[in-house]
Amino acid sequence: MSRVTVVVVTYNSSEVIDACLDSCRPLDVVVVDNASSDETVQKVNAHSSVRLLANSQNRGFAAAVNQGFLASQGAYVLLLNPDVRLDAPPDPLIAALDNDPRCAIAAGVLTNENGAIQYGFTARKFPGAKTLAFEALGLNRVFPRSSVNRKYRCLDRNFTALSEVDQPAGAFLLIRRQAWETLGGFDERFFPVWFEDVDFCKRAREAGYRIVLDPSVRARHEGGHSVNRLSRECREQYWYGSLLKYAAKHLPAHQFRAVAAAVALGAVFRAVLLAAATRSFDPFRIYARVARFGLVCLFAGDVPEFAC
């Protein structure tokens, strides 16, 4: 039985999945496909050593990750996005977990195709109310060098030695199975994507586990592959919905309401700016739903179910 199983969740990933799976040889690999409508399943099936779990509907990223864990038996699971390619075997990450039973998660550095580190994405701090409001209002784009944005995205951090971090990117995580079982897996309420990895890392740290990043381990990351297949309307609703679910789960009620208000106000700002840039009224339709959702959360003090 392999000590490490790679779990890859796919959704219309035919353009990148071959390179990802080729980079994983000779590791044990499970692919969980969330009802792709392209040639992803056929391409995965062409890799004879890869096990495929093909879902008939999109179960969401968190549920697919849990499905991959249940289909494997190794002590560790390497969670890998389909647009990620390993540059080398993840042996140092395995050693980090082997050497410290309180270390639940080990991650490497994500790079662009030219090898440049993807600062701002590779690792981040846990977001508080100020950070989430900053994101919802779009101030992170207006003031990218602000102290709030630099601290959240670890922009001033030099990744030169193994160190503890809050939340490495979910695109490249080695996770201890025992910790996954203790924490109850990924929270499937974050549907279909976003913030489920942040929530998992947050719960791991609160349970006393360590999370480390080893910059000697690197992987190439294309970025945004599957989510770019969604319409802008769905992307915005899912992102804000997951952001608010995280806020409701991890922040006091008054801070959650402040974030919900920021979502509603930020949606208005984005609608006006995007409409002016595109000379279209379509952004008002898209962001009106986001603004209404933010207001519902503000007055309800919780996040209701929604659908795109």
Image (cartoon, rainbow, N blue to C red):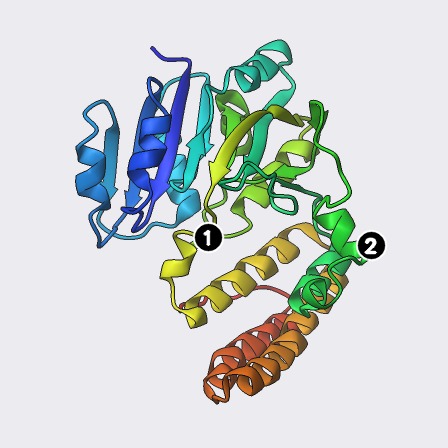
Of all residues, the one furthest to the front in this rendering is: 114
- Give coordinates of residue 75: x percent, y percent: 46, 16
Task: Tell me if residue 71 can be seen.
Answer: no
Q: Residue at x 60, y 85 (%)?
A: 272
Where residue 56 sits: x, y (%)?
22, 49
Give 6 or 122, whichever is nearer the viewer.
122
Residue 184 sits above or below residue 274 on the image: above
Q: Quadrant of the C terminus?
A: bottom left
Rendered position, 231 above or below 160: below
Amino acid type, label 1: Gly
Looking at the image, residue 120 lies above or below residue 109: below
Which residue is depicted at the point 55% across and 83% down?
A: 277
Tell me if mark 1 has few (under 14), some (14-19) or many (20+) residues whose alpha carbon lies within 10 angstroms of its own. Answer: few
- Mark 2 Cα shell of 10 Å, populated few (<14), some (14-19), many (≥20): few
Closest to the observer: 105 or 218? 218
Q: Quadrant of residue 270?
A: bottom right
Q: Earlier in the sequence, mark 2 or mark 1?
A: 2
Give residue 259's quadrant in the image.
bottom right
Please tell me the numbered disc located at residue 10: none
Dot 1: element = loop
Residue shown at 71% from the left, 44% from the top: 125
195 with respect to 261 (left or right): left
Q: Nearer the viewer, residue 292 or 233?
A: 233
Marks 2 and 1 sit apart, C-alpha to C-alpha, by 26 Å
Q: Residue at x 73, y 57 (%)?
A: 131
**Helix, strand, or loop for circle 2?**
helix
Residue at label 1?
224
What amino acid type should be assigned to the residue bearing mark 2?
Answer: Ser
Residue 147: which numbered mark, if any? Answer: 2
**Count of numbered marks:** 2
Tell me where residue 255 appears, x and y as whole percent: 75, 61
Give how far across and how far down residue 224 sits, in percent: 46, 52
